[in-house]
Structure formats: structure tokens, C-alpha cells
Image: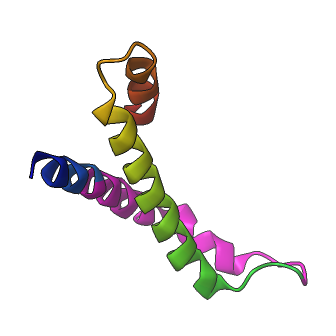
């Protein structure tokens, strides 16, 4: 149960950061740029960024489970920065 709660907190924190980043005015500037022919379609960015944030949260959670090991602490500090 504790593992589920901690994973949920990491996912919630990741979602909060993603939501804050989505509010940035520069996030909408991408559609105004002149795109090369090989540029991915705009609809692809939402699912890809969602997957990336979920995977980053899960990775940080896995490191957090090993937080008593010496190498885990610096990794977690960098993640939270």
C-alpha cells in the first residue's frame, strides 16, 4: 500500500509540473513556426510528453525506493531540481 501511495505522489507531482509547463505562452508558439516536411504532426506532442512525464515519475519512484543507497540521493536531488 505504501508503494502505491508513493508512486501516486510521484505521478501527481509530475502531472503538476507538466500542467505548469503547459501554461507557458511559448508552448503555443510551435504551431506558428515554419515546419520542415519531416516535422511530426502537432497532435503527437501531447501523448509523447504525457508518456515521458509518466516514465520520469516511475523512474524517480524506483530510485526513491533505493534512497538509502549512496547513489540514490544525488539522483533524487537532481530530479527534484
The image shows residue 25 at horizontal and vertical percentages of 49, 65
Q: Quadrant of the C terminus?
A: top left
Q: Is residue 23 magenta?
A: yes
Q: Is residue 22 left or right of residue 11?
A: right
Q: Which residues are magenta?
A: 11-37
Q: Nearer the viewer, residue 41 or 33?
A: 41
Is 37 on the left or on the right of 67, as rendered?
A: right
| Residue 7 shown in magenta | no
Snapshot quadrant of residue 15? bottom left
Count of numbered marks: 0
Rendered view: 14 above or below 77 = below
For this orientation, the residue located farthest to the right is 37
> What secondary structure predominates along the stretch shown in magenta?
helix
User: Which coloring applies here?
Assistant: rainbow
Residue 13: give x, y in percent of width and height. Answer: 27, 51
Q: Residue at horizontal 76%, vertical 75%?
A: 33
Image location of residue 53, percent across then percent down: 45, 59
Residue at 29% over, 18% down: 68
For the point 52% across and 61% down, the residue is: 52
Q: Residue furthest top?
A: 70
Amino acid at each position: 500500500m505504501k508503494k502505491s501511495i508513493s508512486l501516486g505522489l510521484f505521478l501527481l507531482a509530475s502531472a503538476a509540473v507538466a500542467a505548469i509547463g503547459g501554461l507557458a505562452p511559448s508552448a503555443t508558439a510551435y504551431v506558428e513556426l515554419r515546419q520542415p516536411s519531416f516535422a511530426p504532426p502537432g497532435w503527437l506532442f501531447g501523448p509523447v510528453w504525457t508518456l515521458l512525464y509518466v516514465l520520469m515519475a516511475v523512474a524517480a519512484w524506483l530510485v526513491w525506493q533505493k534512497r538509502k543507497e549512496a547513489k540514490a540521493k544525488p539522483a533524487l536531488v537532481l530530479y527534484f531540481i
